[in-house]
Amino acid sequence: MLFPLLVNGQINRSAREFAGEQVQEYIKTKLFKGSSYKPVSLGELKPFQEKRNPEIAWTIEHTFEIKEHSVSDQKAVSKTFRFQFYMDEKMKILRAETYLVN
């Protein structure tokens, strides 16, 4: 009886890890290309329940920091962002929504 729970937990953890890898790649190559990226937290991978967007199967929240260089005073400034990523069944990112945390 315990074995199916362990297997299901391993599958969920692996799916979350894969989603996290997809999110990090998306941030580094499409959103903040060339910026210094530091992950802060990766939320739980959740099934997407809204019927109006049938192509979206999963959602995950991710908080991270980006260092940006100020042109005026030559300093690097860290900004914290929180994004909600929306993915299809194969974990391809279809959409990302954000707001600046600080």
Image (spheres, rainbow, N blue to C red):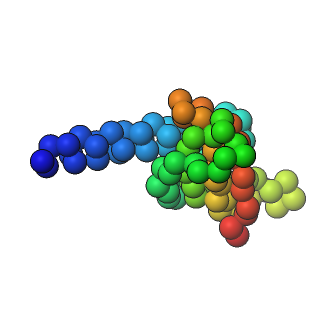
Left or right, 55 with reference to 6: right
Asked whether 55 or 82 is in front, the reply is 55
Asked whether 56 or 44 is in front, the reply is 56
Residue furthest out toward the right: 72
Vertical arrangement, residue 83 with respect to residue 23, above or below: below
The residue located at (47%, 55%) in the rendering is: 44
Residue 57 image position (x, y, % from top left): 57, 40
Please tell me in which quadrant of the rendered image residue 22 appears. Answer: top right
Asked whether 99 or 6 is in front, the reply is 6
The residue located at (50%, 51%) in the rendering is: 46
The residue located at (66%, 47%) in the rendering is: 51
Residue 12 image position (x, y, % from top left): 36, 44
Vertical arrangement, residue 18 with respect to residue 85, above or below: above
Work out whether residue 45 can be spotted.
Answer: yes
Residue 93 image position (x, y, % from top left): 63, 36
Image quadrant for the C terminus?
A: bottom right
Residue furthest out toward the left: 1
The residue located at (57%, 55%) in the rendering is: 61
Residue furthest out toward the bottom: 102
Q: How many marks?
A: 0
Work out whether residue 34 can be spotted.
Answer: no
